Amino acid sequence: STLTEPVSVTLARDARRVANNLQQIVVFNSNRNDPARTLRDWDLWGPFFFIIALSCILSSTASTNKSTVFAVVFAVLSAGAVSLTMNVVLLGGKLNFLQSLSVLGYCLFPLDIGAILCAAYSGKLYRSAMIFATLLWSSWSVYPFVSTAVRPSRKALAVYPVFLMYISMGLLVLA
Amino acid sequence: MAEEGQPQQNYSNPLTAFFHVVFKGSAIAFYILCSFFVSSFIIQFVVTVLLAALDFWVVKNVSGRILVGLRWWNEIDDQGESVWRFESLDQQSLERLNKKDTWLFWWTLYIAPGIWLALGLVALIKFNFDYLLIVGICLTLGVANIIGFTKCRRDAKKQIQSLASQVVTGHMASRLQNAFNF
């Protein structure tokens, strides 16, 4: 039982879970055909750090109103994740609320990388290319989870808003 | 971490109790005092929310286990349904827990979100919506722990009761057997 384990074991277990989730969702999914199984071990720490990171990066590169930018980005990302989940649920999809929050949060990781790279160098073409690439990566990661959760006829309805949110995030990073 | 064999008057897990309280307290204190020290809202936000998140983790994974012997988490089973899982120490260990520890644990668990609620009302009255965001997050984390541990405690009581009734029926069955064997 986990009641009597030392604290370091608990910490290590949670850290390993975040790393595992990150790898499974964003990099390479060993059970591509069964996304529900991948998400069995969801956690919200990863998404938490990624949202904060993205908000920090975007606000540090903003020329004016840094704190407003931060609060707005954070609020938009969280509200966006919540409403996207409601969208899937209302379309009759079978995705657990916290699970999908977890996935949407983890798929922000490529955008985080894109934002860091954009902050480093500010050539217009370079930035657009970076954002485009990371956007593709985000969308590619998130697609299997969302699409398998709803019926095939409703797939586009569920997937489209997700892409929209990531695209707008990408534009926000570009601007 | 074994409990020390100290008399019941003292805290038997002072380090854990300290950590249980320090993150909650510093989050609240930082939120209230931050405008005197730090001018950037971002730093205020990140530090407060980070402290609240750390407190959530510590309470859920460490002090809950050590101070009251309860643990809760959420799993998704094969059908995709979310299942609450609870773990609790057995009856004897539960009774051996230090009373001061448990008192501290439950009281601070309930009081901290209460304070956040009051702070949230203040922010609402002052129309500080970005501070309301901070309060909202800290409140959510606090309430999540309250719900989890209350459910866990209820489940533990139920388990103890069912175990007790099993023991009683087991006793009665063996006594009946003994009676019939003569």
Image (tube, rainbow, N blue to C red):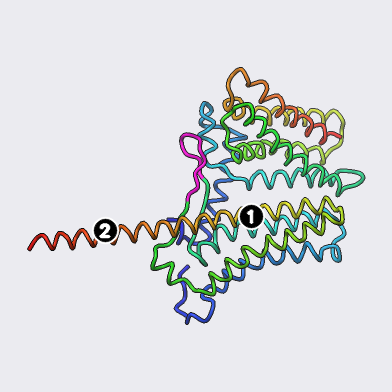
Residue depicted at 54% across the width and 53% down the height:
A12
Residue depicted at 61% across the width and 25% down the height:
A147
Tag 1: residue type?
Answer: Val
Question: Is B102 or A22 nearer to us in this picture?
Answer: B102
Which numbered circle lies on residue B143?
A: 1
Residue depicted at 47% across the width and 82% down the height:
B7
**Quick one: SS at disc 1?**
helix
The x, y position of residue A152, in whole percent, is: 59, 19
Question: Is B174 or B57 nearer to us in this picture?
Answer: B174
Position of B164 with respect to A76 (left or right) is left
Letter of the chain that mark 2 sits on in the rendering = B
Which numbered circle lies on residue B169?
A: 2
Residue B104: quadrant of the picture = bottom right
The x, y position of residue A123, in whole percent, is: 87, 33
- In the image, residue A45 above or below residue B52: above
Position of B136 with respect to B176 (left or right) is right
The x, y position of residue B87, in whole percent, is: 45, 55
Whether pointer 1 and pointer 2 mark residues with C-beta atoms closer than 8 Å, the reply is no
Residue B160: quadrant of the picture = bottom left
- Label 2 CA crowd tier, 10 Å (few <14, some 14–19, many 20+): few
Letter of the chain that mark 1 sits on in the rendering = B
Q: Read off the magenta span.
A: B75-85
Question: Alpha carbon of mark 1 to alpha carbon of mark 2: how far?
Answer: 39 Å
Labels 1 and 2: the sequence-earlier one: 1
